Image (cartoon, grey):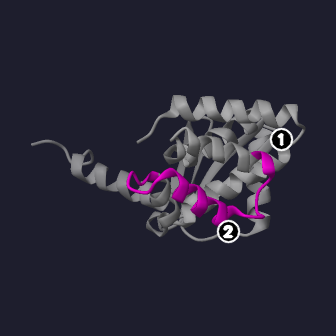
Amino acid sequence: MQNPRLATRYAKSLIELAVEQKQLEAVFADMQYIKALCKESRDFENVLRSPIIKADKKQAIVDNVIKNKITALTIAFIQLIIKKSRESFLPEIANAFIEQYHTIKNIHTVKLTTAVAIGDNVKKSIQQKIQQETAFQNIQIEEQVKEELLGGFMLEFNNNLVDASILRDLKDVKKQFMENIYVAKI
C-alpha cells in the first residue's frame, strides 16, 4: 500500500511546521525513532496497517508505545494522521521526512554493503575518499552486511553503484566461461 505522493505531502507539512516551531532537529529524531520502530517491530506496523482495528484502539496502542519517547508536536501529528485514517502510511511518511530533512541539510546518504561488519576506521576512510572524489561534504553512511558478497563491498550513492565484491567477480568469470570467449569457434 505504497503512496509516495501522500507520504511526501505529509512529510513536507510536518517539516514546515517543525521549522516554524523551531523543532526540526527534535522532530527529525522522532521520525528516526518511528522508522526504527517500524523496522524492528513488525507487529507495530501490522497494527498500523490493520483494517480491523478501530482508530481509537490504534491511537491507544500508539500512545502506549511512543509515550515519553517523542515530542508533543510529533504526537499531535500522529494523532492527526490516525484521525484522517492515514496511519498505515506512517512508515512511508517517516522515510519521506528523513529524505526531505537530508535535502534541507545537504546530507548525502551512502549505502555501504559488505560481507562482514567493518570498523570505524574503515568507515571514516571510505567517507574521506568519497568526499575527495565528489562534491559531497555531509555524508551519512548506512551499513548493511550481506555474507553472500563473500568479500569486497558495494557502494550506492546518488543513483550510482560501485560493485567491488567478490560475488560480482565470480559472476563475471562464470559469464566468461558460459560465453566461451577464449575458445576458438569450430
- x then y, percent, for residue 185: 14, 42
Query: What is the total number of numbered labels drawn onto the structure image?
Result: 2
Q: Which mark is residue 24?
A: 1
User: Judging from the image, what secondary structure is the residue with disc 2 in?
Assistant: loop
Asked if one can make out residue 144 in the rendered structure from this viewpoint, the answer is: no
Q: Is residue 116 left or right of residue 2?
A: right
- Residue that badge 2 annotates: 118
Q: Does residue 60 belong to the magenta stretch?
A: yes
Report the side of 10 relative to 131 (left or right): left
Tell me the quarter of the picture where residue 159 sits: top right
Report the residue at 53% width, 28% height from top: 5
> Viewed as shown, does residue 136 lie left or right of 164?
right
Tell me which corner region of the image, top left, top right, bottom left or bottom right, holds residue 53: bottom left
Q: Residue 175: say if magenta.
A: no
- Name the residue furthest left: 186
Q: Which range of residues does the magenta coloring cover?
A: 49-73
Q: In the rendered structure, which disc, 1 or 2, sits on the residue that comes first in sequence?
A: 1
Q: Amino acid at mark 1?
A: Leu
Q: Main secondary structure of the magenta part?
A: helix
- Residue at x 86% of width, y 31% of height: 20
| Residue furthest right as drawn | 22
